Amino acid sequence: MILTDQQILAEIERGTILIEPYDRSCLGTNSYDVHLGRYLATYRDAVLDARKHNEIDVFEIPEEGFVLQPGTLYLGVTDEYTETHAHVPFLEGKSSVGRLGIDIHATAGKGDIGFCNTWTLEISVSMPVRVYYNMPVGQLIYFTVQGDVENFYNRKPNAKYNERTTKPVESMMWKNKF
């Protein structure tokens, strides 16, 4: 089941959900709006290799915004740092963003119980579009779970995205054994 606005507020009070910065006006009927952070990144190489560490170049979005181009994968980040200790968070793009031709994630829309960080966004566009720091880009939706949790994400020794950051994080696929 999806948490309602009242239940999200109750979970924030309980400490099972943390959102920083928190703004009550961003709380929707059954979601919380998140915003594009200050930084974007692009991969240095034209061809990425899943077995190797692919490095990124990080840059700050200027005040006048930045024009995203089709055919380029941009890594962005939410301005919000979140913690989810008892629910499964899902990140979906806002419909207004989708109507601009912006996809905010390629495949990584689900968080794990125990995920404590900003959200890296895998951004692509269907046509050139100017984006701005702090523009609303997505909505966090929280799902209840059934049963006890054995492996919280933030306690897993092999979790690849635990280090707190305000910048986009490149793929850590190369850390997997394959």
Image (cartoon, rainbow, N blue to C red):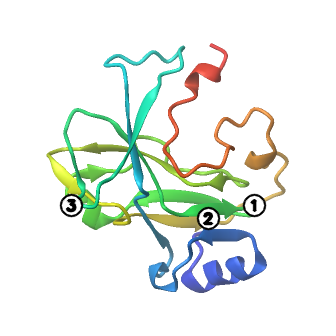
Amino acid at pointer 3: Arg
Which residue is at 69% across, 44% downward?
162
**CA distance separating discs 3 and 2:** 26 Å
The answer to which of 153 and 54 lies nearer the viewer is 54
Amino acid at pointer 2: Phe
The answer to which of 105 and 75 lies nearer the viewer is 75
The answer to which quarter of the image holds residue 48 is: top left
The answer to which of 70 and 142 lies nearer the viewer is 70
Q: Nearer the viewer, mark 3 or mark 2?
A: 3
Quick one: SS at disc 3? loop
**118 up-or-down from 159: above or below:** below
Give the percent coordinates (x, y) of residue 95: 29, 65
Quick one: SS at disc 1? loop
Query: Where, quadrant-wise, is the N terminus in this rendering?
Result: bottom right
Neighbours of disc 1 within 10 Å: few (<14), some (14-19), many (20+): few
Q: Which mark is residue 19?
A: none
Question: Contact (CB < 8 A) between labels 2 and 1?
Answer: no
**CA distance separating discs 2 and 1:** 10 Å
Q: Which residue is mark 1?
A: 146
Which residue is at 19% across, 38% downward?
70
Which residue is at 47% across, 82% downward?
29
Amino acid at pointer 1: Gln
The answer to which quarter of the image holds residue 3 is: bottom right
Give the percent coordinates (x, y) of residue 123: 34, 45
Q: Nearer the viewer, mark 1 or mark 3?
A: 3
Query: Could you tell which of marks 1 and 3 lies nearer the N-terminus?
Result: 3
Q: Is residue 67 left or right of residue 170?
A: left
Quick one: SS at disc 2? strand
Q: Which mark is residue 99?
A: 3
Give the percent coordinates (x, y) of residue 119: 53, 52
Q: Which residue is mark 2?
A: 143
